[in-house]
Image (tube, coloured by chain):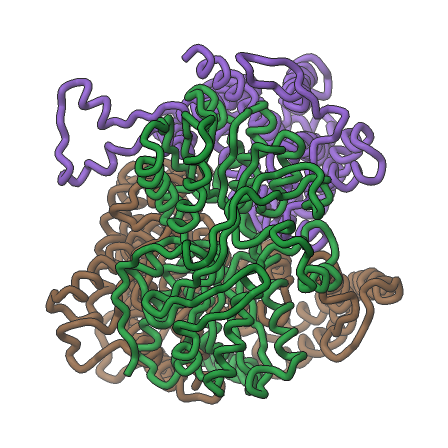
Amino acid sequence: MSGATAAGEHGARSAVPGRRTWRLLAAVALLVALPYLPGFQSDFGRSLLTQMAIAAVFALSFNLLFGQTGLLSFGHAVYFGLGGYAAIGLMRAINHGLPLPMLAVPLAGAAGGLLAGAVFGAVTTRRAGTIFALISLGVGELVYAATFMLPGIFGGEEGITASRTRATVDFGFPLGSQLQVYYAVLLWTVAAALAMYAFTRTPAGRMCNAVRDNPERAEFIGYNTQRVRFIAFAMAGLFAGLAGGLHAINYEIVSADAVSAQRSGTVLIMAYIGGAAYFIGPILGAIVITWLQSSLSDYTSAWLLYLGVFFIVMILYAPSGLAGLIVMHRRVARPRALAGVLAAYGIALVPLALMAGGAILAIEMGYRLSTQPELGTRMRLLWMPLDAASPSPWIVAAVALVGGLLLFRAVVPVVASAWERAAARA
Amino acid sequence: MLELVTVSLLNGVVYGLLLFMLSSGLTLIFSMMGVLNFAHASLFMLGAYLSFQFGRWVGFWPALVVAPLVCGVVGAAIERYGLSRVHARGHVAEILFTFGLAYLIEELVTMVWGRNAVANAVPAVIDFPLFHVFGSTFPAYKGLMMLISLAMFAFLYLALKKTRIGLVIQAALTHPKMLSALGHDVPGVFVLVFAVGSALAGLAGVIGGFMLLTQPTLAHAIGPIVFVVVVVGGLGSLSGALIASMLIGILQTFAVAVDYSLLDLFRALGVIVSRGSPVYELLAIKLATAAPIVPYLLLVLMLIVRPRGLLGTRDV
Amino acid sequence: MNACTRRILALGFTIACLAGPAAADVKIAFIDPLSGGGAATGILAQKTHQFYIDAINAAGGLNGEKLELLSYDNKVNPQESLIQLKRALDEGARYVVQGNGSSVALAITDAVQKHNERNPGKEVLFLNYAAVDPALTNEKCNFWHFRFDADADMKMAALTDVIARDKKVQRVYLINQDYSFGKAVAAAANKMLAESRPDIKIVGDELHPLQKVNDFSPYVAKIKAAGADTVITGNWSNDMVLLIKAGKDAGLKVNWETYYGGSPGAVTAIGEAGVDALKQVSEWHRNAAPELDATVAAFSKRYPGKENEYAYWRAKTMWDMFAAAAKKAQSNDPVKVARAMEGMKMSTSLGEVEMRADNHQLLQPLFVSTLARNVKYDSEGSGLGWKTDAKVEGKATALPTTCKMERPK
């Protein structure tokens, strides 16, 4: 979607749908079919897909601020949460007889997010950079604390609940089962993603990019940078609120957690890891992080540590994110060139596996000893039984880690030269 | 009434000095390098845990020295091997790096010491009432904390203004290229600054670990307030940080003691707000309940009205 | 690239998700705080429930099937808890055990009711072992929720009975956590003290944010300034320990009338200053009976260490009753077990217990106890332990209820 041009972009619209449109339709078809694929047929699988979709909308809205306009916000969950509260309010009204379909609830979320974005944006977009980041942090903490101090509006600690099935009209589209919820959420997700993409192609969207890249120059050609930032902020708030509305439908409860600093932090990680420079980056990030949060925690209690390490490695060595990595490899996608790179990866895989294996061994043993001592020191790592109290696994871990690290450093020039050759050939 | 005011003032000063201890290192790093170090509170937490562990092995007084040293070394390593790669990419990348680091340190601490709070009790040698005020006792460890906090201020102030290395650091803040051209090792200066800042955080953690509960969520609990102090105090200003921390400490402590709300104020002025009015709930909030958000209100106000803070010498 | 990437990812997830949850066994979801401010309480409770489940399995299981405990961290957060509940249900759990955080319990009981309405045949029961907001067995009651701890009002009734008899109590300060449970404690204290001792003056009624206050010194200063001689508080876990710590630091000399004075760490925090001053109302303490029940020794053997001191007697009652109900119903189906558990009476070593059929509240003996020296069994290795002031029999703890329960056909 980013970079690649297709027929129909410039000038007159072609009567035949372009290559890009076909790709989009194929993607949508896949998404529609996803709940019926093996592995996703359980409630858990469909619930996971729904969560990914909601996270994708949220992350895309964050990127309207971050990737598109260069505004780093540590309090984006405020708009998600306030939209969620607005949505759950509408749900309760529908429960009490208001003749609207549940499907329309995310609109209330969007409205709530837009209102909040406009109100807070008017005040906070005067500055960019670090000050903006700090203000967003402060506003986030303020709103979070306010949800506890105004229990009449926000429901206090307990939050506000509603039912997604108690409605007087549904236009034949009830939201009882997880499958139905998934399709409703998917509908809104695709609509939101298309809308956000469309926004980035409008002059306003382009000006956001300009303000990000060179605010001084944007001012010089006559644009008020604060107004541009404000528009971006309001749009980001709108779509974050929409995501909040979807969240309200999916969980039927909204509480202070929806505006918490933790949620703000998670969406930031999603957008960054996915690749903030590409439109599709946050979608990738949302999918990966949601999956990690859900499933990795089943296998290991150290999953948050692995996530932290993953994040830091990405910042240091792959700042353009997963999307950036994919684009980078796409450039050398010619078969001969790619073969060389893949071979180099194969060589690098051995020290990498050694290093990772050593680290994972040490981490898992550490967690077992400190957080679950009553389970004893005998444990299994994958298929290998071992005793965390004895020194031998620790020595093995240390040797693997250090040895792997040294070998890896020796192998890096090999990979680098393989890339050079591939780039020359491509 | 006098008792409440005196005791609250004392408590406020103690809390304020704790905040200063915590934020002095961050002020140094933020002012000198422009890096908003999200991992600062995590290093504070690390200091608390290390003092607990070393305290068990070698006793409290050696731990008081060793724990900050270890934190300083960790800080130096973070700057030398991690942050230095990120400087060139701008402040946003630096912030994100330290943000990820905060997650990492929290999980590493969990890995080593578990999720429960550790029994980081006040060592017997400083656990006695120092003096009595209006029938309340003032424990000695709080007195030690105040002493250390003021000593930190004195050390930093003198080091920055009166020593040569301090002048070099101040120059690196505004004219790094010129400084480099004159032959000073600017990256080395940055490592030093980060190390000292982290060591200060660790030292704060040693004492703070007794006052608060030493558990993995400690960094989350105290982190955001530290940013408030640094920003409200002003960037590049140590005195500003001290004033800001005292202001916030005293304000917040006094706020808890005030059981009145805006509604009461209005009532005193003769304005009656009806119960059905939408702002009723907002106005009915007692100041005591609103105490936790006083720092953030101050932050947002300050950033909107005067972004360079109380005594800031430069803009962000 | 769009579709391509998505296809690859979808394939990857398909493979990953195929490693789904295991089958068979009766799965029991434990959704309580395993990190953060409530962790000490939640982790200890998890070990306790695991202990009793293992005991049931060792004795042959429940109607021949083994029990499995799946643990989820609720972070004392209703929304997070519902996310975890969803996961638990998707992994096949038919019973949910929770206790820490009435706010969480309210969310779970609501969610369980909705789930059961929408999924007949896949009903789930909610076994509440510690969330004591009275609403759960009154206006928010439902057939699927069973509470095994005396509610906040019942406990306050026992406390105020003892306070009423103490003529030295004149000025009472209330300090509680600002959420449903804390407010319930404050309301009950106001009401019951006014009834039994109208001469007592309530000099303060404070609500502080839940699990957020690091330093209670300002609150202690207020208590002192108000001239209180007694403090009534429902604080638990960190909030209890930090409050007590601040009180001790400032040399506050009051009677501490608490619900959770036995929270892990509280006795250590107050030390000698708590003798004859720290009181609690609970269904058990280490000196409630002349000899420690064998279960305590067995638990301590399995989980040694000060932080694992046995605390949840009501968990034993809960699992005993659960096993008995399943045996009586001759089935592990939640609906049948629920019907068997309603109205069930049991004998325990501390007295008679009964699960009320009208609101699913367990009636069990309550003890009001004070921290003292020279007791048979001390707490947390401090040399100090609990001594009973008064015991209220199960039946006498019953309070009227507003519950209008709808039963399944």
User: What residue lies at 59% left-to-right and 54% top-to-bottom?
Assistant: A315
Q: Nearer the viewer, residue B16 or A10?
A: B16
Left/right of residue A1 with respect to residue B177 in the rendered view: left
Foreground pick, B88 / A172: A172
Q: Which quadrant would residue C301 be assigned to in this image? A: bottom right
Chain identifier matching the green colour in the rendered picture: C
Residue C196 position in % (x across, y down): 34, 37
Residue B48 vertical position relative to residue A280 in the rendered view, above or below: above
- Say if B153 sits above or below C52 in the image: above
Q: Colour of chain B?
A: purple
Left or right: residue C309 versus residue C173 is right
Q: Position of residue C203 (x, y in %)?
A: 37, 26
Q: Can residue B115 be spotted in the picture? A: yes
Image colour for chain A is brown
Q: Quadrant of residue C210?
A: top left
Residue at the image position 64 percent from the left and 41 percent from the top: B214
Q: Is residue B266 left or right of residue A310?
A: left
Residue B86: percent from the left, percent from the top? 61, 46
Q: Is residue A20 left or right of residue A107?
A: right
* Whole-percent x, y for residue C125 in the image: 42, 73
